Image (cartoon, rainbow, N blue to C red):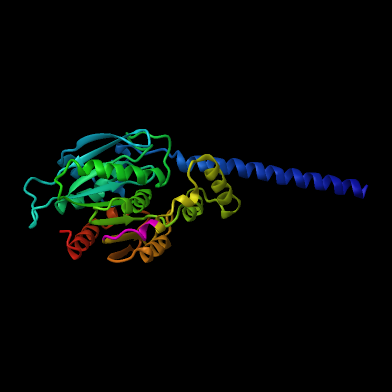
Amino acid sequence: MHHLKGTAAMIYLILFILLITVLSLIVASKCEDAFFHPTPYSKEHEFEVLPTFGYDVRPFYESVKLEEFSLESPNGYTIKGSVIRADENTSFPDGKRRAVIMSHGVTANRYTMLSHGEIWHRLGFDLVIYDQRAHGESGGPDCSFGYYESKDLVYIAEEMRKRFPEDTIWGIGGESMGAATVMMAAPHIPWLSFVYEDGGYATFRAEIPAALKHKKNLPYFPFTPLTILFINHRHEFKVDDIRPVDSVKDIHVPMLFVHGGEDRFVPTENVYPLYEAKQGDKELKIFEGAPHVKAVLMHHEEYCSMLKGFCEKYGIL
């Protein structure tokens, strides 16, 4: 009798472990899908939500003319974007134009970056904003957290350069996934004059558990290892192919690192290895109390002073 009870208990234990394993696999599979197939926000959503953090992009949007463009990515889909020209009376002592290309994060779109664009436009820059793959009006099967996006940005930069005077001074910047995109692309755009990133992750591997904890309140084990397993199995790239911290080592122009002091989605500690990896001219700014990529909205004028000071220090303005 005791033997039968022990056997039954063992069977129940095995069935329980199998059930937990199956459920964990299902959850991890859905997590992988959520990472790479997020539901993008619309322009209208951004215009409604961004002001709740302290800055309304609509007045700037309504005051400028957007020149739409469409490019065919070498990765096999259409990229949609807009150019916003500097005011006609803008001039710099050296007679050269300034331009910046800006990359948005996951679920966002090109209009999200108008919060940054208003500052750059105020400083006299031409602006290039665009929808990352699988976001906004751009095509593409999924987002890839910087892997394909960085290749797109290199292509966009080369195409945009053809549409401006040859001696234009160029920079690139981005937030969140867009920051990772910028960091991974910058070493492959040798004619840049500056780079800035806000809220970027040092490695995708480290970002996965942080995102699962922040968005879904899931513990590291077993969900992070299983999610990574699904990512590595389902995609042509691997999790460890997305390491902005390695790319930063090969950026040789002045670079500004920005992060919110209360960032829980891409924890603030990401910025320190990035900053340490960058050799040469660099600046670091932590906006205390700011959550993920909201410093530009919550502290808009301070953000403007920061960008202006950075550009003046390194001869960009």
Percent of width and height locating residue 50: 30, 46
Magenta stretch: residue 34 in it?
no
Would you identify the image quadrant in which residue 283 lies? Answer: bottom left
**Residue in the image at 15% along x and 47% along y:** 166
**Left or right of 273 on screen, residue 4:** right
Would you identify the image quadrant in which residue 292 lies? Answer: bottom left
**Residue in the image at 53% along x and 40% along y:** 234
Bounds of the magenta span? 247-253
Residue 277 drawn above or below residue 115: below
**Left or right of 53 on screen, residue 163:** left
Percent of width and height locating residue 108: 35, 43
Magenta stretch: residue 248 in it?
yes
Residue 109 drawn above or below residue 291: above
- Asked if residue 118 can be seen in this view, the reply is yes
- Image quadrant in which the C terminus is located: bottom left
Percent of width and height locating residue 119: 20, 52
**Pick the front one: 281 or 189:** 189
- Asked if residue 295 can be seen in this view, the reply is no
Percent of width and height locating residue 110: 29, 42
Residue 97 drawn above or below residue 43: below
State the predominant SS element of the stretch in magenta.
loop
